[in-house]
Amino acid sequence: MAAAAVGILATASVPALAADNLVDEVRIGLYDHNSSLFATRHETSNPDINGEVLFKSPDWLSWAFAPRPAIGANINTGGGTSIAYAGLAWTFDLTPALFIEGSFGGAIHNGETSGPTNGRSRINYGCRFMFHENASVGYRLDEQSSLMVTVDHMSNASACTPNPGLTGIGVRYGFKF
């Protein structure tokens, strides 16, 4: 419930931030939670709703191929683990319409961190703070709109045990200001 309130407040402030030239793009999507395409599904099969805000790349990051700072969340619709994340996203154009993107950063989740995995409801991730990365292949419909296929992953990189990770795959729509 708190994550939904934060999402609503963040979304409400996006137009003002875009007008101030801070926000570059907003995205919304739907992911197959803990997708069985990559491993045995250990959580709910209910989908995740993804929301993400990408900010304009600051000048001081130009040396690193101008990544855009990003914040987002994957909210599970069936009581499984939800995450909030922040990081940097690098977008590379293959053609004027086709692009690839990768991001890397950190995440915090509301899943289990100790004890046995609770059936099919939540995985024991070992620690609260995790690494987060995703990769997308996208197509620009026009100058403002794009569609992406995205693989999204969260893991603790063996910083604590266990380290099962959480991977989702889905589609997203982006609107660039």
Image (cartoon, rainbow, N blue to C red):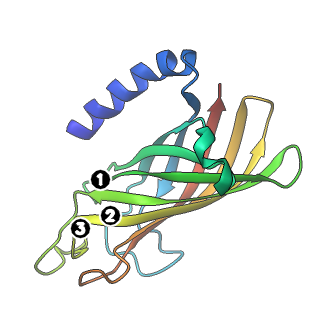
Residue 1 seen from this side? no
Q: Is residue 24 above or below residue 95?
A: above
Q: Secondary structure at mark 3?
A: loop
Going by the numbered disc 1, the residue's amino acid type is: Gly
Please provide percent x and percent y for residue 173.
62, 39
In the foreground, 121 or 99 = 99
User: As shown in the figure, which amino acid type bears the numbered disc 3?
Assistant: Arg
Q: Residues within 10 Å of mark 3 (few under 14, many from 20)?
A: many
Secondary structure under the numbered disc 2 in the rendered image: loop
Q: In the rendered image, which residue does mark 3 sit on?
A: 122
**Whole-percent x, y for residue 141 in the image:** 79, 36
Which of the 4 quarters of the picture holds residue 113? Answer: bottom left
Query: For this view, does 155 lie left or right of residue 18?
Result: left
Mark 1 Cα within 10 Å, few/some/many (few <14, many 20+)? some
Tell whether label 3 touches label 1 (CB within 8 Å).
no
| Residue 78 tag number | 1
Mark number, residue 44: 2
| Tag 1–tag 2 contact (CB < 8 Å) | yes
Q: Which mark is residue 3?
A: none
**Of label 1 and label 3, which has the lower sequence position?**
1
* Residue 161 placement (x, y as % from top left): 23, 84
Q: Earlier in the sequence, mark 3 or mark 2?
A: 2
The residue closer to the viewer here, 147 or 60, is 60
Specify whether 63 is left or right of 96: left
Q: Amino acid at mark 2?
A: Thr
Tag count in the figure? Answer: 3
Name the spot of residue 146 as percent of width and height, x first: 71, 39
Above or below residue 42? Residue 7 is: above
